[in-house]
Amino acid sequence: MKQRIAVICGGRSGEHEVSLVSAKSIAAALDSSRFDVQVIGIDRSGSWWMGPDVIEHLQSGRSPYGERVCFLADPAQPGIFLITHAGLRPVPIDVFFPVLHGPNGEDGTIQGLFETANVPYVGCGVLASACGMDKAVMKALFAQADLPQVPYSVVLRSQWETNREPVIEEVETKLGYPVFVKPANMGSSVGISKASDREELIDAFTEACRYDRKLVVEKGIDPREIEVSVLGNDEVTASVPGEIVPCNDFYDYDAKYIDDNSRLVIPAELDEANTDRLRKMAVQAFKAIDGSGLSRVDFLFDKQTGEIYLNEINTLPGFTSISMYPKLWAVTGISYSELLSRIIDLGVARHAEKQRNATERLPKG
């Protein structure tokens, strides 16, 4: 019998559009001999919809986007239910595949919903998702694991809005220019700006404050941007590294999803020692946040010194046609369709492992 997969996309996030494109690619590539695919779209207000054209309707803003559905987190009868005039009608699903980039999807929130319902799902769990999404917490865990990072500072939006002068002074004395200002809880380079002087720094803070209450400021270097894909649960493997040569000053949102001039060099032109080190560090980063299923780990390779710095981990990387995560695995030897099958299998295996945990206190022995 085929497994029934719910691909969930859209969501209340600045990465809504990217999610829809990723989900469309995934739904088309899933092995039809193994899986029956149902696409669930979440609109910007948070309402859930189901239907064969839900992605296209969300992309065009054509409401209603499909048939209204809801998710019940009751472990006795969990999952997707179609909302009808006669009441709720269950929609059988075996595995949930969230393709929700950014807040309300990649940050542990929907993972918590799945955990409460006790249903199998793809990707990292609540803890890893939350830590991977929050760049400040993520960096603290990487530091604890002795993984090298560029100097950085964490700033609260309230600090910036009530007393910005000490913030500016700290950035200029501790980090110097240039710096990158980022929302702590956002992906796809949304809200990120490079600042080379005080005026640009003020503009960068203003932009980042639109997306989060916590901001990360990183010292700028002249890097090669290297990425490694990881796959696994307790046993983790890493892909060959790949290099991004951005068409813009850095690999911002436009360079990732709109412009088609950035180049991906796979495998990256690195010697064997650096290749091995990057793959090892990628696995260490994945384990540092207690990752499972999949992640993409991003590095900065300083052109001047040759030093390697861990930049960040993305627990739900993009799956568009130009996304690095599947391209790295394709060169490593795993096709797009096979990769998706393995990711689903890993989610099912993790769920089965969790069912071994007692939910009540048992006698010893």
Image (cartoon, rainbow, N blue to C red):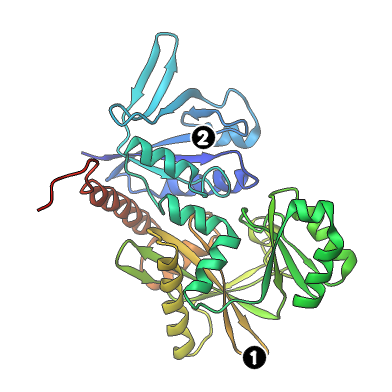
**Would residue 352 be found to the left or right of residue 255 on screen?**
left
Find the distance from the CA under tag 1 to the CA under tag 2: 46 Å
Which class describes the residues within 10 Å of circle 2: few (<14), some (14-19), or many (20+)?
many
Quadrant holding the N terminus: top left
Is 90 rendered above or below residue 33?
Answer: above
Is 52 rendered above or below residue 138?
Answer: above
Give the residue displayed 35% in from the left and 70% down from the top. Answer: 237
Tag 1, which secondary structure? loop
Tag 2, which secondary structure? strand
Residue at the disc numbered 2: 41
Q: Residue furthest left?
A: 365
Can you give x and y, in whole percent of width and height, for residue 148 in the image?
55, 79
Q: Residue furthest right?
A: 199
Which class describes the residues within 10 Å of circle 1: few (<14), some (14-19), or many (20+)?
few
**Would residue 232 be found to the left or right of residue 217 on screen?**
left
Is 296 rendered above or below residue 347?
Answer: below
Query: The disc labelled 1 sits on which kind of residue?
Result: Thr
Tell me, yes or no, if residue 146 can be seen here: yes
Residue at the disc numbered 1: 305
Give the residue displayed 49% in from the left and 43% down from the top. Answer: 109
Marks 1, 2: nearer the viewer: 1
Image label count? 2
Can you give x and y, in whole percent of width and height, for residue 22 in the image?
52, 49
Please tell me which residue lies in front, 296 or 255: 296
Query: The disc labelled 2 sits on which kind of residue?
Result: Gly
Give the residue displayed 66% in from the left and 80% down from the top. Answer: 223
Q: On residue 84, which mark appears? A: none
Answer with the quarter of the image where residue 33 lies.
Answer: top left
